[in-house]
Image: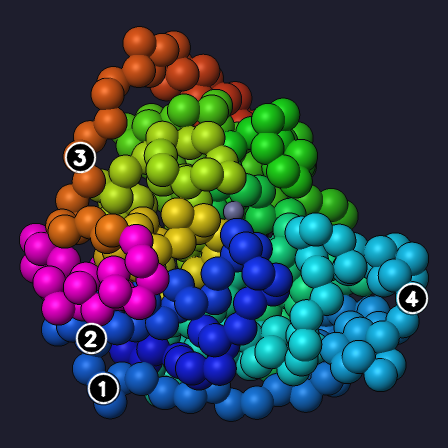
Amino acid sequence: MRFVFDPELASFQLAPEHPFKPLRYELARTLLRAAGALEEDEVVPPRPVSDDDLLTVHDERYVGLVRAASAPSSRPPDPELQRHGLATADNPVFPRMHQLVRGVVAATVTAVDLVAAGAARRAANLSGGLHHALRDRASGFCVYNDLAVAIRRAVDRHGLRVAYVDVDAHHGDGVQWLFYDEPRVLTVSLHESGRYLFPGTGFTYETGNGRGRGTAVNVPLEPFTDDDSFLECFEAVVPRALRRFAPDLIVLQAGADMHHRDPLADLSLTLRGMRGAYERVVELAEELTGGRLVLTGGGGYDAYRTVPRAWALAWSALAGRSLPAEVPPAWREEWEGRLGVELPATFVDEEPEPSPRAAAIAGRNRSVAQRLLAQLEEIWSEAPAA
Ligand SMILES: [Zn+2]
């Protein structure tokens, strides 16, 4: 087990009051240490990557633009930045943006390299998971796509077939589009439907293109989907898709914004359902990849109350370790003092009030998953697995 960590990647802000809070990463690390679920010698620094490494998925002019924008003396005019999604409310320009986000990429690449080379069975970069970044465009708080750079490298340099599983509340659009034609990468995303939520994609008919046909899988879910319906849809689709694809490595994007307290999305999960999904991904890695699994973070905007506990559960699932029922009081008191917010005392959420619409929502999700699977089986039967 390796936990890739660079304190610099937890210590910046995109802008004051911006909902994406890198400090979550430090809260998760310290929570795991306090709970006895992370050993000091499991924490490793990222190995740096070069700008050339970014060019395996990003456009050269775009990388140049991000680099120029990262120093006040060379900042391009806003209209030019805005054509590439920068200098916007979602993706403000911030000091050392290029260097810091390249550091996030380096941490995910390090995690993949450690697992691909057999130096670790599993590795995590909780600062990573920037799944919305596109080839030449920042989007949804994401400037560079660390996941795509690392997956590209797993395929090209290590010769692996990679299954990407994205349980963030938002569609993993950047990763999907960057591998839409690639038969050696399967992208699976469960998310709140793009009819209701950013980025407005991730429909069942997005199934991949050309030689990659049948390697994009999308499960768009109704707002207010709960734990049981989420896990039912996961079980209906994900094991079948992964077994059919037969990956050498699984990359799990564990954005934590499907939680019912998240302010930017409308799903109604609790930590129980989230932990259930993490544990199933670990079991599938045991079954299919010899255990090889890389974990990243992602979204999560109930940043201090929910995200550190969710990611502690994800890491513990990877490590096969159990957490105590109580959040360690010393950790809670320290961060309550530093942040000025009240933090939950246990790793178990109170179950939210059952929604009177829960059965109707579950029924709709079930029929979406069934139709999706029927459609995929037809595509898969035409195009045998590579
Ligand atoms: Zn998200």
Q: Amino acid at mark 4?
A: Pro
Query: Which comes before the other along the chain, label 2 or label 4?
Result: 2
Q: Which mark is residue 77?
A: 4
**In this view, 36 is above or below 213:** below
Residue at mark 1 to residue at mark 3: CA–CA distance: 32 Å
Q: Amino acid at mark 3?
A: Glu
Q: Amino acid at mark 1?
A: Glu
Residue 128 among those drawn in magenta: no
Spot occupied by residue 155 in the image (x, y as percentages of width and height): 59, 72
Query: Disc 3 marks which residue?
Result: 350
Contact, mark 1 vs mark 2 (Cβ under 8 Å)? yes
Query: Disc 1 marks which residue?
Result: 40
Q: Badge 1, how many Cα within 10 Å: few under 14, some, many 20+?
A: few
The residue lying at 86 percent from left, 81 percent from top is 74
Numbered range of the magenta stretch: 315-341
Q: Which-is-in-front pick, marks 4 and 1?
A: 4
